[in-house]
Image: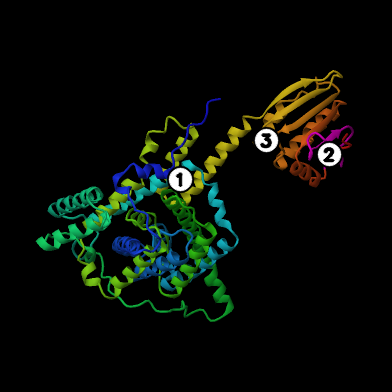
Amino acid sequence: MKPTPTRPSLSAFAKNLSFTKWRNPKFTEYSPERIKIETLAGLTVALALVPEAVAFSIVAHVNPLVGLYAAFIVGLITALIGGRPGMISGATGALAVVMVELVLHHGIEYLFATVILMGILQILAGVLHLGKFIRLVPHPVMLGFVNGLAIVIFSSQLDMYKIGPEGARVWMDTITLVTMIGLVGLTMAIIWVMPKITHIVPAPLAGIIITAALVIGFGINVPDVGSMASIKGGLPTFHIPYFPDVNNAQALWEVLVIIFPYALILAAIGLIESLLTLNLVGEMTGKRGGTSQECVAQGIANTVTGFFGGMGGCAMIGQSMINVKSGGRTRFSGVTAALFLLGFILFGSSIIERIPLASLVGVMFMVVIGTFAWRSLTIMKKIPLTDALVIILVTVVTVMTDLAIAVVVGVIVSALAFAWSTATRTMSRVEMTEDGTKIYNLEGPLFFGSVESFAELFDPENDPNHVIVDFMNSRVVDQSALQAIENLAFKYKSNGKSLQLRHLTQDCHKLLKRAGQLMVDANDDPEYQVAVDYSVKTGILGGGH
């Protein structure tokens, strides 16, 4: 059998791109040089967060400040107590598209209540350690996920070219469009060249500053952050969701019936995206994160956000990559990004609103280049066909629907492909002893997918009177396997023959005993330690030897 080709790690894709290389000297965790890098990384992230939060607020049909408050609160709390230093969280499009229907049909107070319940569900997921199931996501699903995400980020930036007078969502005129494309290209060129010149300032931040200086200095007429919406506001204030018509337990129950499905979906999407981001950032930085800790942090952040007028959020892969590529490695950069964002809202709106969108789009396009797993295009012919199909499927579903659905679909398809592959590998080596006993040495697990192949291995009509099925290299996995064994025993019994089961592992032993179908011999096989023999002689399986 041909060996399975080695799959490159996700970090290998990033390391091949000059934008992704940040040659950090070895600093102590919070040396002055490290603090400078973390602060500049946080500033870069905060600048990129503004248009994203505003855009997602518009998608969800809420005031831009609702998205900005969510980006600040969720970003701050997860930076402080999250499972992976260097990750950035905030309002995301994956959550915004789910919130639209709720806001349109029931109002924003229902949204705040939903975000609170969403946070509680995420805390429960963390306490119950449900985050560990993210390890069930296969590598091809991760590749499809990052590819689809890169395409989604790219397509979302195209909306920045549809900002007309007074924020109207129409395509720009030709001159403005060409000018903006040129500025986007300039920003990308600066980000690509800057690491070759100096690492004093993160390349994305340098791209934003230089492009903004040119636009403002020469009075170039292109859309800026202020053309989307004003970001000026005050501190978020504590607010308990208010429902004027809810004055008894029945009315409260009706509210819960409305918000629970939304909260459950939002909690699942938020955790899936956050945990996948945690794994991706871990690949890039070479450090592992705590899944349960991240679930609890996301839950606390969303619960608090709901009480302070925010739309909730989760980890943001695009901004997390900007942070990591800008040198952010500790919690300091995430905290700094959140505080800078609050500073923009309170004091710096007039300055931030003048930053051209072209510079921020250029940064996000470089994130797309760094996110997309380019080598996945060249390894398609080298990996198993099912893995290649899973990569393509997850990429397409991510673009067509959302990230959570794509991951679930990818996991299901991968699991079914594995089950089919395992089922087709069920086989048997046949031996005959001197006394005429026939021994079937099974290979591969016995489960729902392999029971048909298992049944086809035997010939009850023509086999000798005594048959042994040896499970040394196999195991009984589920109820379908138990039923297959019982059916096989019945066939041999109907032909007046004896069937013996040998070398069942301890867990299989317990499984068969719980089923109540077997009389178990308490004597272990001295050569196999935990194995026990079972015999089928009369109407039931019983009387081991």
At mark 1, the secondary structure is helix
Tell me which numbered mark, 2 or 1, is placed earlier along the sequence: 1
Seen in the picture, residue 202 relative to 119 is either above or below; the reply is above
365 and 331: which is toward the camera: 331
Q: How many discs appear?
A: 3
Q: Dot 2: within a 10 Å radius of its alpha carbon, few (fewer than 14), some, or many (20 or more) residues? A: some
At mark 3, the secondary structure is loop
Can see residue 198? yes
Seen in the picture, residue 298 relative to 376 is either above or below; the reply is below
Tell me which numbered mark, 3 or 2, is placed earlier along the sequence: 3
**Is residue 208 toward the left or the right of residue 142 in the image?**
left
Residue pointed to by mark 1: 142
Residue pointed to by mark 3: 445
Can see residue 258? no
What is the CA distance from the residue labelled 2 to the residue labelled 1? 44 Å
Looking at the image, which residue is at 42% across and 52% down? 281
Q: Which residues are magenta?
A: 517-541
